[in-house]
């Protein structure tokens, strides 16, 4: 393989990277998962999103600082290896791959659920199978094509959320339409109070809230293919944080101001419900298309990220060598092949347990997400220590509050993990996690991978 073929192509621009991360984040966690979360916490769900958003702010600033220090594919696995040790890098890389594979199963499940809005007789497993086949083919194209596809996927979701916020604020201000007589910000505290289930209700929603933020770290995976990373990555990191907080909290505030939270069904997307009641022609059909697009977009990001993570693992000697090769389009096709094959398990689960599969896979994937975010914060502490000792260069893009904030965020992530035990349907993740980490430990020490950061293709300007 020639040198030019051994590098990922740097064809992702700032708009691509911002929208890829937004596309990976704004998925079923907001459009579908928020329905059950509202039922469990009421208006106090806003507090859950705000607290989670603050943690995400610091995680992304820490990641942004590490990215400007060394912009490579599979970034946080590389940083874990460099600043926490080879075992941490191995576990992080494979756990991130596992997390996105399982998260893609959740997105595929959502596609199956929402297609049945039009075709209730269709088996729930069939739409996920068809969607996976199309996305698998798309991800084998050049990365620039993927970037454009994901840009437009994500833009559809963002336009929808902005339209809901604007239309909702107009209804609240001028009291017209179906919601006119009851639309008011007082709905946020008039039906059982702002905390109808107390703080326990808030805590019980943290699992779905943090799952909804999953994917924000995709900026790190795109680093190896970012055009002009020193400029693009800091901009993308700062921009994504505030946009996600605006879209999530803004949309939820408007929804629960338009209609009392206790009138929302946990089985129906609040976006579908609100747009339909606003009197927009074919609103339910339009929003269902948008929700399917959201799930498809997030699954698309999952295939992208898992292929790149397997490529990074192989380049560092921590995965099968075959995953370290690129096809003629400079795409890590072997990793995409494996990821798509494993995602077929999600199709099988939709056949076996269609009612439970969504909560199962979201809970299991969240464990991998929390590990990844935690390791970013720990690796950042190691990086700052290396900077103070003069072993590595300091980045001009710095996270505030280190190292105290790092450990506070890690403690918060551990707390969210512990909260999974409170509900039987999420407890399954805590059964799966020890098995997964046990298998990784056996794999690491059994295969004895060699820590070889120098094998990673050097980032090209």
Image (spheres, grey):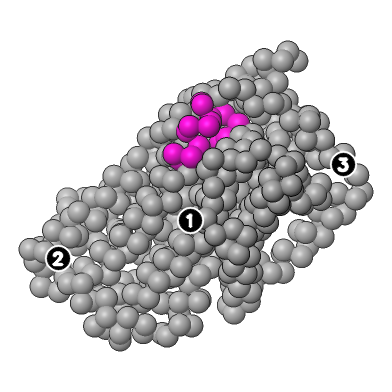
State the residue at coordinates (42%, 65%).
49
Residue identifier under label 1: 57
Question: Is 11 one of the magenta-colored residues?
Answer: no
Within-10-Å neighbours for mark 2: few <14, some 14–19, many 20+: some
Task: Tell me: residue 387, above or below residue 142.
Answer: below
**Earlier-in-chain disc, 3 versus 2:** 2
Residue identifier under label 3: 449
Residue identifier under label 2: 172
Task: Tell me: residue 21, above or below residue 202.
Answer: above
Task: For marks 2 and 1, give the one nearer the viewer.
Answer: 1
Within-10-Å neighbours for mark 1: few <14, some 14–19, many 20+: some
Task: Tell me: residue 443, above or below residue 197.
Answer: above
Label 3, label 1: how many angstroms apart (C-alpha)? 34 Å
- The secondary structure that dominates the magenta segment is helix
Contact check, label 3 and label 2, Cβ < 8 Å: no
Within-10-Å neighbours for mark 3: few <14, some 14–19, many 20+: some
Mark 1, secondary structure of its residue: helix
């Amino acid at each position: 393989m020639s040198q030019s073929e051994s590098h990922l192509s740097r064809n992702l621009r700032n708009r691509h990277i911002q929208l890829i991360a937004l596309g990976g984040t704004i998925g079923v966690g907001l459009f579908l998962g928020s329905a059950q979360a509202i039922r469990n916490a009421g208006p106090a769900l806003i507090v859950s999103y705000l607290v989670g958003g603050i943690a995400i702010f610091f995680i992304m600033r820490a990641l942004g600082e590490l990215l400007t220090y060394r912009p490579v594919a599979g970034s946080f696995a590389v940083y874990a290896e460099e600043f926490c040790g080879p075992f941490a890098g191995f576990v992080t890389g494979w756990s991130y791959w596992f997390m996105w594979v399982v998260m893609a199963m959740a997105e595929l499940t959502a596609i199956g659920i929402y297609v049945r809005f039009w075709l209730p007789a269709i088996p729930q497993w069939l739409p996920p199978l068809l969607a996976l086949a199309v996305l698998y083919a798309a991800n084998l194209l050049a990365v620039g094509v993927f970037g454009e596809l994901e840009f437009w996927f994500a833009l559809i979701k963002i336009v929808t959320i902005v339209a809901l916020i604007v239309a909702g604020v107009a209804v609240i201000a001028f009291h017209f339409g179906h919601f006119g007589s009851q639309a008011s910000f007082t709905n946020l505290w008039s039906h059982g109070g702002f905390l109808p289930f107390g703080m326990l209700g808030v805590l019980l929603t943290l699992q779905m809230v943090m799952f909804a933020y999953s994917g924000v770290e995709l900026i790190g995976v795109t680093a190896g293919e970012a055009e002009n990373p020193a400029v693009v990555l800091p901009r993308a990191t700062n921009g994504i944080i505030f946009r996600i907080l605006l879209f999530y909290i803004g949309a939820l505030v408007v929804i629960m101001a338009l209609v009392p939270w206790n009138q929302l069904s946990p089985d129906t997307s609040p976006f579908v419900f609100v747009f339909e009641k606003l009197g927009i022609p074919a609103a339910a059909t339009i929003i269902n298309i948008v929700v399917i697009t959201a799930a498809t977009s997030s699954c698309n990001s999952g295939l992208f990220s898992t292929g790149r993570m397997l490529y990074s693992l192989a380049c560092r000697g921590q995965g099968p060598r075959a995953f370290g090769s690129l096809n003629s389009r400079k795409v890590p096709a072997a990793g995409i092949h494996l990821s798509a094959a494993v995602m077929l398990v999600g199709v099988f689960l939709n056949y076996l347990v269609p009612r439970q599969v969504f909560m199962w896979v979201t809970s299991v994937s969240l464990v991998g997400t929390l590990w990844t975010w935690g390791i970013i914060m720990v690796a950042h502490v190691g990086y700052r220590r290396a900077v103070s000792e003069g072993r590595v260069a300091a980045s001009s893009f710095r996270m505030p509050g280190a190292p105290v904030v790092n450990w506070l965020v890690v403690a918060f992530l551990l707390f969210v993990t512990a909260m999974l035990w409170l509900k039987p349907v999420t407890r399954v993740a805590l059964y799966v996690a020890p098995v997964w980490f046990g298998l990784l430990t056996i794999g690491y020490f059994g295969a004895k991978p060699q820590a070889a950061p120098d094998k990673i293709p050097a980032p090209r300007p």
